[in-house]
Image (spheres, rainbow, N blue to C red):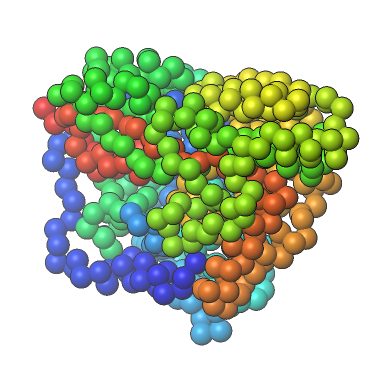
C-alpha cells in the first residue's frame, strides 16, 4: 500500500536492479517428468474465474499477465516490457514484449490484451479491480493503455495481484463463459496436455517460450523463466498419507500440505528435503449473513464469543500455528490488531447471552467444510463442538473442496459457516485481502448482494486516499468493522509443510509450486 515500495519494485522489473551484467539462468539439466502430489481437486483451470489455491497451483504455470509480483511480493512487469504512468496518474501505458507466442503458435499483440481485459471485466473473479477504470485501448499492436476514471494510488498494486489475475489469453477466447475454458491457452513456460479433474493434470514444456530478459533469474511468479522439465504432472491426492508414501517411495518428486505428525521421521530421510512455510494461510470461517439464523448479528456474535481459537487451531494445524488477529500477519507492513477485542473470547456465558437476546430457538447452523484440506475439516469439527456446548444446533455438511467453493459462491441456501483459508491474499497485502469482503467477491454473502455501506466506504478509502498513512488507517477501520459485525471469523495462521526429493533442484517454496527453473539431477 506504500507507493515508494511499488516504484522500487517496478525499477527492478525494468532492469535497474544492478544485475545487468549477471549471467542469466541456464538449466543444469533438461528432461524428465516432475510429479507433484496436490492435496485438493481443482474446480477449473480458467484462472480468471477462480481464486482457489488448487486452480492457481496448476494454472499459473500455464498463464502469464501484464504484471505480477516478485519474490518479496512487489509489483513487476511480466508480459509488458515497460509501463509509463501519466503525470496526472489517469493513464497507464504498457509496451508489450516482442516475439511472445501463445501455446497455439499465435503471436501476442495488444488485441489479445484488450480481449483479456474485456473478458475479465465480465467474468473475472476479482473484476472489482477494474471498477475505477474508464476504458482501455490499443493504439498499435504492441501498446495497451488503461484510462482511469479518477486517481487511484493503489491501482498498480491491485493490477499485479495474482490472487485471481488478469491473465492474457488469445483474443478468440474473449467470449468464453466463466469457468468454461476447458483447454486453456497461455504464454507460460508450460502448456496443457491433459486435464482429468479429481485425478491428474499433465503439462509439457512449451518450446516456443521466450524468457523475460529484463531479469536474470526467476523471481516470484515472474522474472527469467525456463522449462527445464519435459513434463510436469499434478496428481490429485486428497489423502495426506498417500502423498507422504509417494514422496518416500519416489513416486512423487514433490508434495504439499504434509501432516506435521510425520515430520520427525521425514526429516531423517536423506532422500527428502522438508520445506516449512510459516504463515502459510489464515484459517477462517465466513458467515452467511443472508440465511437464518446467521443473518442476525447477535447470533454471529454468539458464535464468535463461543470460540477457543487455541483449541481450534491446535486441531487444524497439529500445533503448528500462531494466534493471529485480523487479516494480515504480524511480520507484514499492513498488519493491525484493530478489532482485537472480538478475538479469541472463549466466553460461553457471553455467547448464551447473545443467543437469548437474538431470540435463538435452536435453528440449525450448518458448517460447510471439506476433507480435501484436513485443517479446514478439523477446524470445523472443533467449532461444532464449541457451538453445541453453548446451545447452538451446529450441523456439519462435508463435501469435496470444489463443491464447497461452488456452493459458497453460487448459493445462499443450505449453509451458515463456510470453512476456508486465506493464504495468497494476505501474502499479497491488505488490498488483495480486503477485496474478498466487497462485491462482487463478498464472502459473507450480504443480504440482497448489497455491501455494508461502512465497510464499502473504508474499502474505497483504502483504494483512493492520497497518503499511505490514510490508506493504512482505512484498512484498520475496515478490519475492525468486519470483526465487530462478524463478516469473517479468523482463527489463526498455519505453518505449511511441503517437501521434495533430494534430487530436485531449483524448487523454492512460494504461494504456488513454480515449475519453471526446476530440474532433476541424476
Across and down, in percent, residue 139 comes to 54, 72
Q: Nearer the viewer, residue 166 or 496?
A: 496
For the question of whether residue 469 can be seen, the reply is: yes
14 or 100, which is in the foreground? 14
Q: Count the numbered circles shown.
A: 0
Which quarter of the rendered picture does the C terminus lie within?
Answer: top left
Q: What percent of the width, then of the height, locates residue 321?
A: 42, 37
Q: Where 395 falls versus 344 (above or below)?
A: above
x, y percent for residue 279: 41, 44
Classify 236 as above or below 438: above
Q: Is residue 130 visible?
A: no
Vertical position of residue 88 compared to residue 166: above or below: below
The structure residue drawn at horizontal position 56% and vertical position 51%, both measured from the top left corner, is 326
The residue positioned 62% from the left and 52% from the top of the image is 341
Res 24 quadrant in image: bottom left
**Left or right of 1 on screen, residue 11:** left
Q: Residue furthest front?
A: 349
Residue 491 as seen in the image, left or right of residue 178: left
Whole-percent x, y for residue 97 in the image: 37, 62
Q: Residue at x 70, y 23 (%)?
A: 388
Q: Residue placed farthest to the bottom in the image?
A: 87
For image coordinates 71% across by 65% down, the residue present is 457
Amino acid at each position: 500500500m506504500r507507493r515508494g515500495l511499488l516504484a522500487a519494485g517496478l525499477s527492478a522489473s525494468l532492469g535497474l536492479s544492478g544485475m545487468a551484467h549477471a549471467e542469466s539462468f541456464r538449466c543444469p539439466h533438461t528432461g524428465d517428468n516432475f510429479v507433484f502430489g496436490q492435496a485438493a481437486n481443482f474446480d477449473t483451470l480458467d484462472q480468471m474465474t477462480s481464486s482457489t489455491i488448487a486452480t492457481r497451483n496448476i494454472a499459473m504455470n500455464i498463464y502469464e499477465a501484464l504484471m505480477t509480483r516478485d519474490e518479496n511480493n512487489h509489483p513487476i512487469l511480466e508480459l509488458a516490457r515497460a509501463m509509463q504512468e501519466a503525470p496526472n496518474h489517469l493513464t497507464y501505458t504498457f509496451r508489450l514484449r516482442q516475439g511472445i507466442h501463445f501455446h497455439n503458435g499465435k503471436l501476442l499483440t495488444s488485441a489479445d490484451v484488450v480481449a483479456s481485459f474485456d473478458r475479465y471485466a465480465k467474468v473475472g473473479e476479482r473484476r472489482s479491480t477494474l471498477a475505477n477504470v474508464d476504458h482501455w485501448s490499443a493504439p498499435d499492436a504492441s501498446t495497451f493503455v488503461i484510462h482511469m476514471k479518477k486517481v487511484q494510488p493503489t491501482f498498480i498494486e491491485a493490477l499485479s495481484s495474482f490472487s485471481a489475475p488478469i491473465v492474457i489469453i488469445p483474443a478468440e477466447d474473449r467470449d468464453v463463459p466463466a469457468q468454461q475454458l476447458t483447454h486453456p491457452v497461455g504464454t507460460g513456460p508450460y502448456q496443457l496436455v491433459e486435464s482429468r479433474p479429481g485425478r491428474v493434470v499433465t503439462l509439457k514444456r512449451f518450446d516456443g517460450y521466450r524468457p523475460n530478459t529484463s531479469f536474470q533469474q526467476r523471481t516470484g511468479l515472474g522474472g527469467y523463466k525456463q522449462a527445464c522439465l519435459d513434463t510436469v504432472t499434478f496428481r490429485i491426492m486428497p489423502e495426506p498419507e498417500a502423498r507422504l508414501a509417494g514422496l518416500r517411495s519416489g513416486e512423487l518428486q514433490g508434495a504439499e500440505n504434509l501432516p506435521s505428525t510425520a515430520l520427525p521421521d521425514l526429516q531423517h530421510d536423506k532422500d527428502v528435503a522438508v520445506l516449512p512455510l510459516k504463515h502459510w494461510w489464515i484459517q477462517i470461517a465466513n458467515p452467511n449473513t443472508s440465511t437464518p439464523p446467521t443473518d442476525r448479528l447477535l447470533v454471529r456474535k454468539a458464535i464468535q464469543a463461543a470460540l477457543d481459537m487455541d483449541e481450534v487451531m491446535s486441531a487444524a494445524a497439529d500445533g503448528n500455528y500462531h494466534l493471529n488477529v485480523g487479516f494480515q500477519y504480524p511480520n507484514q507492513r499492513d498488519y493491525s490488531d484493530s478489532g482485537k477485542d472480538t478475538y479469541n473470547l472463549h466466553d460461553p456465558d457471553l455467547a448464551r447471552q447473545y443467543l437469548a437476546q437474538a431470540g435463538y430457538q435452536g435453528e440449525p447452523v450448518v458448517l460447510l467444510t471439506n476433507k480435501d484440506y484436513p485443517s479446514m475439516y478439523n477446524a470445523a469439527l472443533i467449532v461444532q463442538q464449541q457451538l453445541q456446548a453453548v446451545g447452538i444446533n451446529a450441523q456439519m455438511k462435508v463435501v469435496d473442496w470444489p463443491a464447497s467453493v461452488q456452493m459458497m459462491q453460487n448459493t445462499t441456501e443450505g449453509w451458515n459457516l463456510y470453512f476456508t483459508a486465506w493464504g495468497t491474499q494476505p501474502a499479497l497485502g491488505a488490498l488483495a485481502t480486503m477485496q474478498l469482503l466487497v462485491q462482487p467477491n463478498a464472502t459473507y454473502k450480504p443480504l440482497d448482494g448489497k455491501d455494508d455501506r461502512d465497510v464499502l466506504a473504508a474499502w474505497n478509502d483504502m483504494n483512493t486516499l492520497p497518503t499511505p498513512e490514510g490508506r493504512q488507517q482505512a484498512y484498520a477501520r475496515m478490519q475492525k468493522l468486519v470483526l465487530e459485525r462478524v463478516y469473517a471469523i479468523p482463527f489463526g495462521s498455519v505453518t505449511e509443510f511441503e517437501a521434495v526429493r533430494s534430487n530436485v533442484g531449483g524448487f523454492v517454496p512460494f504461494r504456488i509450486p513454480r515449475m519453471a527453473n526446476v530440474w532433476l539431477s541424476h
